[in-house]
Image: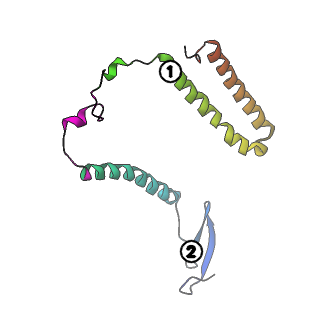
Amino acid sequence: MRDARGARVSLRKRASFRVLTPTSGPIECSHVDSYLPILVLAVLAAALPLGTIIAARVIQSRRPNPAKGEPYESGIAPSTNAFDTRFSVRYFLIAVLFVVFDVETIFLFPWAVYFHRLGVFGLVEMLIFLAILIVGYFYVWKRQALDWA
């Protein structure tokens, strides 16, 4: 195989990727080099939100107004303070239980995709997982945590 200049190039297997090297000598690639794209992605992932926050601070208009400090900008004076409205603990309990059971059922999708590859072992593991999930559901039901009133 020849490169753009016409020099001979050999294809050598290094670690888990292929490296094109001139025949005069191989280029040694360490395993740390393979983490460079991950580092670049992590820096970009951190820079994007920080850059957005800084840009919003620079661009924002600074015109303080007492109306902006009000809880509602509809022109109607609020009849109560926000602290007077109390929610039942059951509301938050049901919300947390929904999140828990919803996240638990998300684990069913990867299992369904790899069902044939996992075989009987995957089936038994999923049955155990579902049994624990159903026991938890019945426990919450018996404790009447799902009742609104």
> Which stretch did the figure color magenta?
59-77
- Chain-order first, disc 2 or disc 1: 2
Q: Quadrant of residue 82?
A: top left
Task: Determine whether 23 is above or below 32 in the image.
Answer: below
Give the residue at mark 2: 21
4 over 126 or under it: above or below: below
| Residue for badge 1 | 91
Q: Position of residue 43 (x, y in %)?
A: 41, 53
- Determine the residue positioned at 57% across, 27% down: 98
Instruction: Specify the farthest residue to the right.
Output: 120
The answer to whether residue 87 is above or below residue 4 is above
**Residue nearest the observer in this picture, 63 or 107:** 63
Q: Position of residue 66 (x, y in %)?
A: 19, 35
Task: Name the residue rendered at 76%, 42% in the picture.
Answer: 115
Q: Main secondary structure of the magenta part?
A: loop
- Crowding around mark 1 (Cα neighbors within 10 Å: few <14, some 14 to 19, many 20+) is some
